[in-house]
Amino acid sequence: MAKVLILGAGGFIGHHLAHRLKAEGCYVVGADIRPPQFSPSPADEFHIGDLRDPAFCLSIFGSYDRLYQLAADMGGAGYIFSGDNDASIMTNSAQINLNVLALARETKPGVLFFSSSACIYPDPMEYHPGIYAESTAYPAQPDSEYGWEKLFSERLYLAHARNFGLNVRIARLHNIFGPQGTWDGGKEKAIAAISRKVIAAADGGTVQIWGDGTQTRSFLYIDECLEGIERLVSSSFMQPLNLGSDEMVSIRALTEMIISISGRKLSIQHVEGPTGVDVRTSNNSLINNALNWRPTSPLRRGVEATYSWIESQMKS
Ligand code: NAD
């Protein structure tokens, strides 16, 4: 039975990953500063503590077949792009990654997975049209401090692979969404935030979205994200790899899709707010070559599942 450690097991992706790995028969140890928000963790052991604290990290480290490092100080556009949280985001996440690597050097997990982000890519207006192949990360110019910390930490993991022989895997995740994700409170992301606004609006009313709605993104459903992580972890590919959908959608078209799922008549109102870069999507050539697989699930299917879960939460 494989023994795995999930750091950030109380978070959206970590909680789903714990379910998947338990179902596959792993012995799952989870750690987070808080338990999962919406349902209990299925982990065999769940340790509550602060991964910025080396003593807490020491208490949960040991011999693991796989270690998944998903813990980070993060949130949606309102949290990452406002500038108000920059110092905390950089300090907290870098401290966690430094602690993890100091112990991984000693304990040598079979595979060490690090969750990087599409936010490491440079501003598309200056460099290229926003369809990011992995090689376009440099020259680096992420548009947020969150992205800079992820890029620094990618390099930190790769340096530890080089100098200490750690068996590292790095995925650059692009907008993961699904049920059991945060949908209010300021850290929610686009699909959850727009779904909440649509559900809360009175029939015939309006839904506010940030910016003019022409920003385009792609969104990856959680099940395909986990499939990609597992395929990457089982491969021998050690360079950072995009894990995202290449189905591009503007925020306005996404909002229209969610309104149509709701079956109600609502109009869209554009308001000032943080929007991030104009265009960002995943180029999936490398993942296709490296893993002989790439995400293909249609966006609407995942949005429907997420919408109905948020609706059930808001009505309960
Ligand atoms: P999340 O915020 O739901 O999960 C992160 C977890 O880390 C949270 O449960 C949080 O409590 C925990 N954490 C933060 N600081 C901690 C600390 N000091 N000690 C212990 N635990 C701490 O985020 P998620 O969506 O599950 O993302 C998981 C990882 O994937 C993160 O590293 C994130 O940066 C990365 N990522 C996610 C997306 C996405 O769209 N969800 C996109 C790109 C990258």
Image: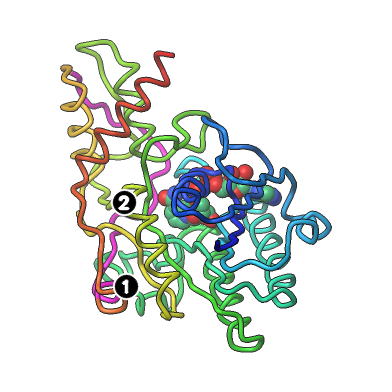
Q: Position of residue 68 (x, y in %)?
A: 56, 61
Which of labels 2 and 1 is toward the front? 2
The quadrant in which residue 111 appears is bottom right
CA separation, marks 2 and 1? 24 Å
Name the residue tied to disc 2: 220
- Quick one: label 2, few (<14), some, or many (20+) residues within 10 Å? many
Residue at the (66%, 39%) spot, across then down = 34
Q: Position of residue 267 (x, y in %)?
A: 19, 22
Give the left or right position of residue 143, taking residue 293 as reference.
right
Amino acid at dot 2: Leu
Asked if the stretch drawn in magenta spans residue 278, the answer is: yes
Residue at the (36%, 48%) spot, across then down = 222
Question: In terms of sequence position, does the residue under pointer 2 or pointer 1 come before the other?
Answer: 1
Residue at the (66%, 49%) spot, across then down = 31
In the image, 36 versus 274, the foreground residue is 36
Q: Secondary structure at mark 1?
A: helix
In the image, 309 versus 137, the foreground residue is 309
Amino acid at dot 1: Tyr
Q: Position of residue 193 (x, y in %)?
A: 38, 32
Q: Is residue 183 above or below residue 228?
A: above
Q: Is residue 310 above or below residue 243?
A: above
Asked if the stretch drawn in magenta spans residue 133, the answer is: no
Q: Is residue 234 above or below residue 264?
A: below
Q: Secondary structure at mark 2?
A: strand
Magenta segment boundaries in residue numbering: 266-288
Classify the position of the C terminus by image quarter: top left
- Residue furthest to the front in view is 1
Q: Which mark is residue 127?
A: 1
Q: Determine whether the beta carbon of the residue marked 2 sits less than 8 angstroms from the nearest atom of ligand 1.
A: yes
